[in-house]
Image (spheres, rainbow, N blue to C red):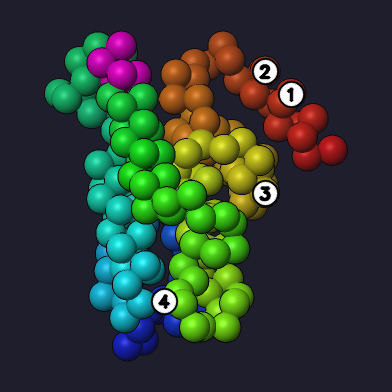
């Protein structure tokens, strides 16, 4: 993806989505950071918000930061609340389809961008439908489920997750 503007590459948004699904939040954050240089101010601003949250995503394996499971769960809830609050404040009540619009510019010009951002935000928020839609197969869906949807997932919960994913994919 070596171009002057990486966001012009057709694999830009799918790559970020794939990284998030697979738990590679720092590479996704790096690519999101490239958008902070975008000339359209709303894109660079939203990218900065998402870059920050991707780079600070709490992970259960960070045992020095979260020695107790309850500390990790609370950190994830706080992270998710901050993400939602910042995205909501950025959107300022704008409806879907007008997130990045500006005065005097043809409507729909930024739709592709909004679609890319929407996928990233939905994945970061752990929306089950987005995960099932973006996952390449059931393995990726199950892995993403434990990282994004149910961060408290235990081995004993897997049969229920398999059933749910199988039910939704049929």
Tag 4, which secondary structure?
A: helix
Q: Which of pointers 1 and 3 lies earlier in the amino acid sequence?
A: 3
Give residue 81's position: percent from left, percent from top: 36, 31
Q: Is residue 117 above or below residue 81?
A: below
- Contact check, label 4 and label 1, Cβ < 8 Å: no
Q: Which of pointers 4 and 3 lies earlier in the amino acid sequence?
A: 4
Q: Label 1 to label 3, Cα distance in Å? A: 16 Å
Disc assigned to residue 163: 1
Residue corresponding to mark 4? 7
Q: Residue at x 15, y 23 (%)?
A: 64
Q: Label 4 to label 1, Cα distance in Å? A: 37 Å
- Contact check, label 2 and label 4, Cβ < 8 Å: no
Instruction: State the quadrant of the N terminus.
Output: bottom left
Is 73 contained in the magenta span?
yes
Specify the segment rendered in magenta: 70-74
Secondary structure mostly seen in the magenta stretch:
helix
Tag 2, which secondary structure?
A: helix
Tag 3, which secondary structure?
A: helix
Q: Which of pointers 4 and 1 lies earlier in the amino acid sequence?
A: 4
Q: Residue at x 64, y 24 (%)?
A: 161
Residue 151 in sight in this render = yes
- Contact check, label 2 and label 3, Cβ < 8 Å: no
Q: Label 2 to label 4, Cα distance in Å? A: 38 Å
Tag 1, which secondary structure?
A: helix
Disc assigned to residue 133: 3
Disc assigned to residue 160: 2
Q: Nearer the viewer, residue 38 or 96?
A: 96
- Tell whether 18 sits left or right of 160: left
- Contact check, label 2 and label 1, Cβ < 8 Å: yes
Q: Is residue 29 above or below residue 70?
A: below
Q: Residue at x 58, y 15 (%)?
A: 157
Give residue 50's position: percent from left, percent from top: 34, 53
């Amino acid at each position: 993806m070596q171009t002057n503007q990486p966001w012009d590459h057709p694999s830009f948004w799918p790559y970020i989505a794939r990284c998030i699904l697979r738990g590679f939040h720092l590479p996704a954050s790096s690519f999101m950071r490239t958008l902070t240089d975008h000339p359209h101010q709303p894109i660079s601003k939203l990218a900065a918000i998402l870059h920050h949250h991707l780079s600070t995503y709490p992970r259960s394996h960070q045992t020095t930061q979260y020695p107790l499971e309850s500390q990790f769960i609370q950190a994830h809830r706080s992270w998710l609340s901050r993400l939602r609050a910042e995205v909501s404040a950025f959107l300022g009540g704008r409806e879907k389809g007008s997130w990045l619009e500006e005065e005097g510019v043809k409507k729909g010009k930024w739709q592709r961008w909004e679609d890319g951002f929407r996928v990233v935000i939905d994945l970061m928020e752990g929306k089950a439908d987005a995960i099932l839609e973006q996952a390449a197969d059931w393995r990726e869906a199950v892995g993403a489920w434990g990282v994004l949807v149910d961060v408290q997932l235990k081995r004993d919960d897997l049969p229920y997750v398999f059933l749910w994913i199988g039910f939704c994919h049929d």
